Amino acid sequence: MIAYIVRRLLLLIPMAIGMVVVTFGLLLLIPGDPAAVLLGQDATPEAILNLRNALGLNDPWYVRLWDYFAALLRGDMGTSIFQNQPVAEIIAGRLGATIELAVVSLLLATLIGLTLGVLAAIRQGSFIDTATMLFAQLGVSMPVYWLGLLLMLLFAVQLGWLPAIGRGVPLHEALFAALTGRPQVLWDSVSHIALPALALAANSAAIISRLVRASMLEVLREDFVRTAYAKGLRKGRVVVRHALRNALLPVLSVIGLRFGALLGGAVLTESIFAWPGLGQLTIAAISQRDLPLIQGIVLTFAIVFALVNLVVDLLYAAVDPRIRLG
Amino acid sequence: MKSFLLTTSAIVALSFMPAQIAMAQDAQTVVVGTDVDAGTLDPRLTRDTTASRTADLIYAGLVHITPTLEPVPDLAESWENPDPQTFIFKLRPDLKFSDGSPLTADDVVFTYTSLIDPDFNAPARALYTPISAVEAVDPQTVKFTLSAPYAPLLSYMDVGIVPKALVEGGADLALNPVGAGPMKLVSWNRGSEIALEANANYWRGAPEIENVTIKIIGDNSARAQAFEAGDLDVIQSPLSPQDIERLKADDRFGNVITAGLGVNYLNFNTKDPLLSDPKMRQAFAMLVDQDTIVNDIYQGVDQVAHSIILPSSWAYSDTIAQPTFNIEGAVALFNELGWTDSNGDGVLDKDGADLAVTLATHSEDPNRVQTVEYMQAIFESAGVKATAQISDWPSFSTNYVQKSMHQIALLGWLNIVDPDRLMFAQLTTGGSTNWGGYSNPEVDALLQDGRSTLDQAERATDYQAAATILAQDLPYYIVSAQGYQMFYSKDIPVSVQATPRGNLRGLIGFTD
């Protein structure tokens, strides 16, 4: 098991190198000069050239790529051209918010998806089934951007229940505050994350619910389920302990993959709800051609995604005793 | 699994509980929504609107530019011009930065010396290059010597003065700004919000409003909704047309539209064989339906432009007129120049070649994209094959227009506090931003004279004469003068004054 984890972690290295090279190549191909964007409308050509030299943008590409790797080995992700701060520092300051949003969304999506999927499967053909599948259809087809605005319109503008924008204190700190007698801090954080998390979760919840339903329907027809009923077990126990556990396997791998989609969706959600994560930063970095920052963000997303999928693979083994990692 | 389910259901249940949300209108706090985060809070390096608006609150310059674009004394008490190439500024006594340290002539000299240093890479450096020397005569007097007379300079002297001692001591003003303006920085959560509080050390005393928070929300509609929900007290351009109508109808909000300091214009590449004849440019200009563009695409916030001089400028004259929308006239002019539909396919042609032109703009501004698409349709109806080329700003600007690879490009200029700002670098022969390659010795002489004399009446005459020629020559066709719009909550406890640049001092009690 440990050997397996170590091997998977070592595989991150070639993956990271590949990511850096591919991103670097793409950034070479897309036109646009950060120096010109930085200097704005009044810049003279000499000023742009001067700044390009200062930023090292006039060096040949292999020198720049080599320098980047050399710096990366020292743990230095470079300096943002526009914010003039170390990239690692900028990302570290905002990664937490994005991960928090993605994790809460994933939990929400899983919870909604599992509940609806199981209900739809055990009541196949009923009203619940139809309603669930309708929700799934809507959830899959509604863009997160639009849903976000609708949720904001309803809960913040019309009802005034939840704040439209911003973030409270980080959830783990808020939980601690609540445990030490300040529940309003937790409420503040939860009320801020509710709308963006819900908007972001809808799509994944829909996909998961469809998958759970299909997977459950298949498992519920298996012999061992009939055996379980024959043993006289209660329905709830059969569904949860026997059927769901077996139906969960394909769902689990999808949940892992959804995390990547959530990180991507967070980019849009964050800019609507002014959530101070990596999403807004990514949009700005790309539109300004802030090359070191784009590199750093892509690398960070890739590593986070790879780690999440490692965790999912470990969960696989936990859910299915037939799978042995090693 | 069970406890996980319990926790998550608790979170979900909680999130649907109604609750009282604190409104933004905490008595002495103004919360302003904006579209981008500030890139830096060093006033010498600002390049986005949020940075310059925030810097205008944190710092003070030698002069302050009023809502009517007049330079009035700020840190400087007075100034004089013993000759056209010398400015002598007298500072107010006992000026202090927000940290309590004194502000003297040395700080002014330091600020301007770094601005004109090529290695400092200040984005606005080109505006200050006529300054050849800046020196402290005594702790309260600064003398600027210019290499040539340069009238617009005073309009640019609102740049914030930075504390020399702090910067030389290694402080990074970009992140930890210290200025002598009406507010000071409390905290800056990058990408999220900038919190400011009143600065009691400002020479006019602390402003009435104690706190200003600037919240960054990238999406225009989301920002408008957050404003309606009460999370924001003020929002301003850019706004989406569909939100503007709704907000106008809401009597909780005040609404101001003022002329901005920008233009949208067509940049004709005068070096392009098709466009080198001014008559061709005139014919194309007659295909621009300014009224529809301004009223339907820009929802009446912008104004139809008639010349290169902004209507809000002291140099404006309503007797100058560019060609106006006239499809028949344009076709007649094309015919006169030899472009006729000889083969009856609906497209004008000459010597066997169709009349084809590329209209370009950048994708970030949906209004400009729509304008180009609309123009494309009109061009087609007049028998011109028009191709629309739309790419994002970095590639559009640096790899296309700035390399003079365009034919007709829809672009904008901002911050035109002085006519010189829209003409000198852009339209003099070999000017640093003359991407269309325009050259006319007569215009060169007028623009040079316009910046060299300090007499405003004479300057106005120069710019009007230049604008008259430009309205015929058309290296630029000015489509519209940008408007600037602000909505504010009527609960703000001070009287609100909008400024053409969207600066915020008018929200904290300083309305001049």
Image (spheres, coloured by chain):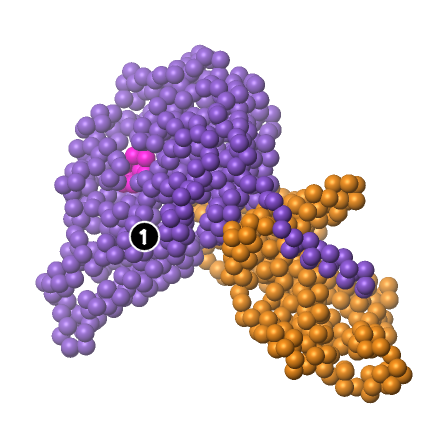
Chain colours: A orange, B purple
Which residues make up the magenta segment? Answer: B414-424
- A220 or A204, nearer to the observer: A220
Extreme residue in the right direction: A231
Residue B315 lies within the magenta run: no
Residue found 58% across the figure and 22% down from its top: B99
Q: Which residue is mark 1?
A: B299
- A124 or A210, nearer to the observer: A124
Residue found 29% across the figure and 62% down from its top: B374
Image quadrant where residue A220 sits = bottom right
Q: Is residue B197 left or right of residue B80?
A: right
Image height of B260 relative to B145, above or below: below
Extreme residue in the bottom direction: A223
- A119 or B370, nearer to the observer: A119
Image quadrant where residue B428 sits = top left
Tell me the subunit letter for badge 1: B
Residue B423 lies within the magenta run: yes
Q: Is residue B138 left or right of residue A191?
A: left
Per the image, label 1 sits on a secondary structure element best described as loop
Q: Is residue A144 left or right of residue A110?
A: left
Give coordinates of residue B2: x percent, y percent.
81, 63
Can you see residue B199? yes
* Disc 1 residue crowd, few under 14, some 14–19, many 20+, Cα 10 Å: some
Image height of B435 relative to B147, above or below: below
Give coordinates of residue A250: x percent, y percent.
73, 75
- B509 or A260, nearer to the observer: B509
Residue found 15% across the figure and 77% down from its top: B344
Residue found 83% across the figure and 86% down from its top: A226
Quarter holding the C terminus of chain B? top left
